[in-house]
Image (spheres, rainbow, N blue to C red):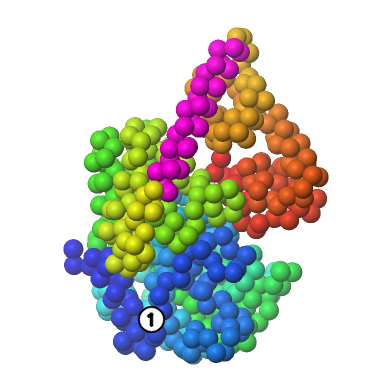
């Protein structure tokens, strides 16, 4: 292909470096450095947060540049930006993705940022202008925030048709890093994959036909702990474009999984699982969820590689618990849907390193360690799954006429073996047996209460619990690791 993913990445950084004098800064690790408001690095701007807030050490190298460009490793699985549930179901949200970005720290502002972005997309990458739609912040009266007419005027003055310039509210066009932190109105660029007449109506509608590609944020505020917006000392530009989505466009595809960032992984999955082939079906059409399993696996193995290389290991709380669940989810999809043999996951690691190792050399350096950690965790999980199945079968035999699974057994499977409750639910459903969810909630609640009384435990270590318990703990003022609880219940 003319635009390999490597080329797309390099063209972006070269454009800002050479044409507009930006300094190329390497990606930070995905493990946040000293920022408890984050589980994982979720955007290119994270490492520059102190510059936005005006708290960076003026002697640090970071503060020497007013124009910066980079390609940042991002993970969105937990916290304010959590895309885990979309992964595999759609073809453009990943748990790990690369964000291409350019920044102005008190240097250029809206007009230059829009001009540069448009020049790059339409003249360098040569994307036809009529396929692009732009959005701007339409204001929010409750918060007393005005519509960003300035951005609208800028786009119109650049010759963009007015029916391609659309206002949206807080949810889409006011970007926030987390519950607290830098934020501001943004203007975004979307791509119409179909060339359809109704594309404008599909912008920001979770449609695979019209997909958001680039976000230009005008960082003007900091969201304080009390929820208020404090105006920042200077005006900044922070942009982020998903590399995978851009590559999809430039390689003439509809799905991120059909680009050179993913196809070698899909091939490796097929070769080592010897299972059914990937057909690229989405949603209802994907009978048996074979294609979803492929996408989930391809996504999760990338995330596992990047996280482990950056020192986040599968574990028991916070980001590490998230990673453990991602690993277990991958193992389940590979064994249950693709009937892949044990050890299969680790076998995909060299392929990921081959694709991403040039851009992120730590993946090459750490290949063996990543494989070892994945294998150890896979073995442990498969063994608890097996033990769990045995307990379930024995219990079912003993149940006789009852159609409700004993809550004590379910609880102990979950607590002691780490057996996923949603999997238990599915297995029971197949046998026409119900799960006593109320009873389980009650047990979880009692357990949490006990824990809270005895050790004032951190919520982070109780994340296996259900939402009610978490709410109860929060009412009691047990400290929470910010991201873990929200994440916990969703995954099951
Ligand atoms: P979406 O609305 O599609 O979920 P977003 O508005 O949450 O995207 P931003 O926070 O604005 O995304 O991030 C900037 C860019 O990063 C997006 O325009 C998109 O290209 C890319 N991006 C965001 N989330 C993901 C993801 N989970 N996987 C791949 N790319 C992503
Ligand atoms: Mg999103
Ligand atoms: Mg969006
Ligand atoms: Mg966005």
Q: Which residue is mark 1?
A: 24
Residue range highlighted in magenta: 373-399
Q: Position of residue 172 (x, y in %)?
A: 53, 65
Residue, x 72% and y 33% (percent of image)?
443
Residue, x 43% and y 37% (percent of image)?
379
Residue sitting nearer the eye, 368 or 478 = 368
The answer to whether residue 92 is left or right of residue 407 is: left
Label 1 near ligand 1 (CB < 8 Å): no
Figure check: 263 above or below 426: below
As helix, strand or loop, the secondary structure at mark 1 comes to: strand
Figure check: 60 above or below 388: below
The answer to whether residue 378 is left or right of residue 271 is: right
Residue, x 62% and y 65% (percent of image)?
36
Displayed quadrant of residue 33: bottom right
Residue sitting nearer the eye, 101 or 51 = 51
Instruction: Name the dominant secondary structure of the magenta segment.
Output: helix
Displayed quadrant of residue 52: bottom right
Q: Quadrant of the N terminus?
A: bottom left
Q: Position of residue 132 (x, y in %)?
A: 36, 69
């Amino acid at each position: 292909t003319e635009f390999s993913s490597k080329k797309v990445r390099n063209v972006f950084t070269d454009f800002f470096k050479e044409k507009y004098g930006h300094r190329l800064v390497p990606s930070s690790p995905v493990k946040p450095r000293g920022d408890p408001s984050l589980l994982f690095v979720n955007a290119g701007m994270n490492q520059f947060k102190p510059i936005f807030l005006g708290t960076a050490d003026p002697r640090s190298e970071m503060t020497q540049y007013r124009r910066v460009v980079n390609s940042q490793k991002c993970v969105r699985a937990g916290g304010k930006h959590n895309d885990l549930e979309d992964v595999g179901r759609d073809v453009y949200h990943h748990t790990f993705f690369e964000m291409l970005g350019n920044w102005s720290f008190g240097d250029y502002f809206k007009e230059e940022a829009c001009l540069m972005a448009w020049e790059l997309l339409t003249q360098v990458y040569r994307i036809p202008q009529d396929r692009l739609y732009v959005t701007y912040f339409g204001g929010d009266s409750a918060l007393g925030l005005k519509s960003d007419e300035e951005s609208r005027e800028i786009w119109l003055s650049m010759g963009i048709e007015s029916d391609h310039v659309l206002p949206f509210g807080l949810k889409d066009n006011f970007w926030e890093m987390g519950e607290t932190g830098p934020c501001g109105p943004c203007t975004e660029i979307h791509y119409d994959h179909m060339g359809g007449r109704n594309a404008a109506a599909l912008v920001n509608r979770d449609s695979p036909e019209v997909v958001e590609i680039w976000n230009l944020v005008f960082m003007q505020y900091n969201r304080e702990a009390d929820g208020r917006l404090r105006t920042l000392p200077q005006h900044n530009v922070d942009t982020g474009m998903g590399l995978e989505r851009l590559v999809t466009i430039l390689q003439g595809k509809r799905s991120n999984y059909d680009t050179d960032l993913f196809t070698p992984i899909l091939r490796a999955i097929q070769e080592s699982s010897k299972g059914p082939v990937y057909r690229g079906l989405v949603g209802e059409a994907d009978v048996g969820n074979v294609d979803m399993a492929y996408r989930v696996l391809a996504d999760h193995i990338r995330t596992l590689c990047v996280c482990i290389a950056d020192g986040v290991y599968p574990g028991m709380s916070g980001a590490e618990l998230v990673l453990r669940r991602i690993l277990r989810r991958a193992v389940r999809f590979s064994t249950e849907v693709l009937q892949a043999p044990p050890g299969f996951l680790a076998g995909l690691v060299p392929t990921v390193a081959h694709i991403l190792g040039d851009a992120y050399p730590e993946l090459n350096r750490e290949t063996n360690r990543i494989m070892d950690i994945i294998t150890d965790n896979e073995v442990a999980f498969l063994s608890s799954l097996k033990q769990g199945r045995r307990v379930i079968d024995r219990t079912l035999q003993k149940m006789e006429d009852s159609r409700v699974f004993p809550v004590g057994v379910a609880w102990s499977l979950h607590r002691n073996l780490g057996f996923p409750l949603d999997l238990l639910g599915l297995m029971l459903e197949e046998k026409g047996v119900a799960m006593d969810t109320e009873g389980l909630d009650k047990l979880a609640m009692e357990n949490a209460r006990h824990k809270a009384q005895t050790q004032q435990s951190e919520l982070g270590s109780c994340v296996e619990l259900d939402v009610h318990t978490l709410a109860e703990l929060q009412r009691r003022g047990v400290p929470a690791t910010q991201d873990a609880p929200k994440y916990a219940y969703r995954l099951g």
